[in-house]
Image (tube, rainbow, N blue to C red):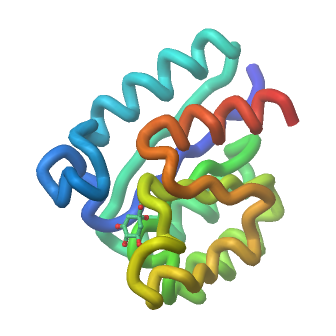
C-alpha cells in the first residue's frame, strides 16, 4: 500500500462554515474532508486528514509525515504568516508540499502576504475556496 497524503489544517479552520463565510465560504471542514476523501479514493490515493489549533501538534504531525506520508497538503491558516517552527518541520520532512489557502491572501491585509510556508512549498494555491484542496490533490496525483 502506498503511503497516504497528509492533509493538515491549522487554527480556526474547524470554524469553517460559520467563520466569515463572505471570505471563507459556507463549506465546513468536514464537507472538505468528505470531498477530498472521495476524490482521493477515485484517484487511488490514501488520505490522512487532520486539523489542530496548536502549532506543536501540527509540527508533530509534520514530523510523523516524514516517515509515514507520501506528500503533504497544508493549510497552515494563521501560522502561515509567522511560524518558523512549521517552516522548519516542513523543511525537515523532505516531502512534496502543497500550500492551500481558501482565500486569496494576496488580496487581503498586508500581514497575510507573507508566508513562511511557501519557502518549503512546491505549489501554492490561494483563492480557489474549498476546491483548492482538490486542485492540490490532482497536482500530487499527476506529479
Ligand atoms: C487562510 C488564510 C489565513 O491568512 C488565515 O489566517 C486563515 C485561513 C485561508 O485558507 O484562506 O485562517 O489560510
User: In the image shown, does 46 or 109 lie closer to the viewer?
Assistant: 109
- Which quadrant holds residue 56? bottom left
Q: How many marks?
A: 0
Q: In this view, does 125 lie above or below 32?
A: below
Q: Is residue 82 above or below residue 42?
A: below
**Residue for point 57% across, 85% down:** 114
Q: What quarter of the picture does the N terminus occupy? A: top right
**Residue for point 62% across, 59% down:** 99
Q: Residue furthest right?
A: 143
User: In the image shown, does 111 or 86 lie closer to the viewer?
Assistant: 111
- Which quadrant holds residue 140? top right
**Residue for point 41% across, 47% down:** 50
Question: Horizontal and vertical percent for residue 83?
Answer: 52, 85
Q: In this view, does 17 lie to the left or right of 101?
A: left
Q: In this view, does 36 lie to the left or right of 78?
A: right
User: In the image shown, does 104 or 114 lie closer to the viewer?
Assistant: 104
Question: Horizontal and vertical percent for residue 36?
Answer: 49, 28
Q: What quarter of the picture does the C terminus occupy? A: top right
Q: Is residue 86 above or below residue 72?
A: below
- Which quadrant holds residue 97? bottom right
Question: Horizontal and vertical percent for residue 5?
Answer: 64, 38
Q: Is residue 44 above or below residue 97?
A: above
Amino acid at each position: 500500500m502506498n503511503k497516504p497524503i497528509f492533509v493538515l489544517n491549522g487554527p480556526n479552520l474547524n470554524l469553517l462554515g460559520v467563520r466569515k463565510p463572505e471570505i471563507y465560504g459556507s463549506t465546513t471542514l468536514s464537507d472538505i474532508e468528505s470531498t477530498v476523501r472521495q476524490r482521493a479514493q477515485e484517484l487511488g490515493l490514501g488520505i490522512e486528514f487532520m486539523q489542530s489549533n496548536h502549532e506543536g501538534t501540527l509540527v508533530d504531525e509534520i514530523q510523523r509525515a516524514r516517515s509515514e506520508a507520501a506528500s503533504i497538503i497544508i493549510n497552515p491558516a494563521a501560522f502561515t504568516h509567522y511560524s518558523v517552527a512549521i517552516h522548519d518541520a516542513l523543511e525537515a520532512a523532505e516531502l512534496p508540499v502543497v500550500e492551500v489557502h481558501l482565500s486569496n491572501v494576496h488580496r487581503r491585509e498586508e500581514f497575510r502576504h507573507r508566508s513562511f510556508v511557501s519557502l518549503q512549498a512546491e505549489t501554492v494555491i490561494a483563492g480557489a475556496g474549498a476546491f483548492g484542496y482538490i486542485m492540490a490533490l490532482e497536482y500530487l496525483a499527476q506529479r
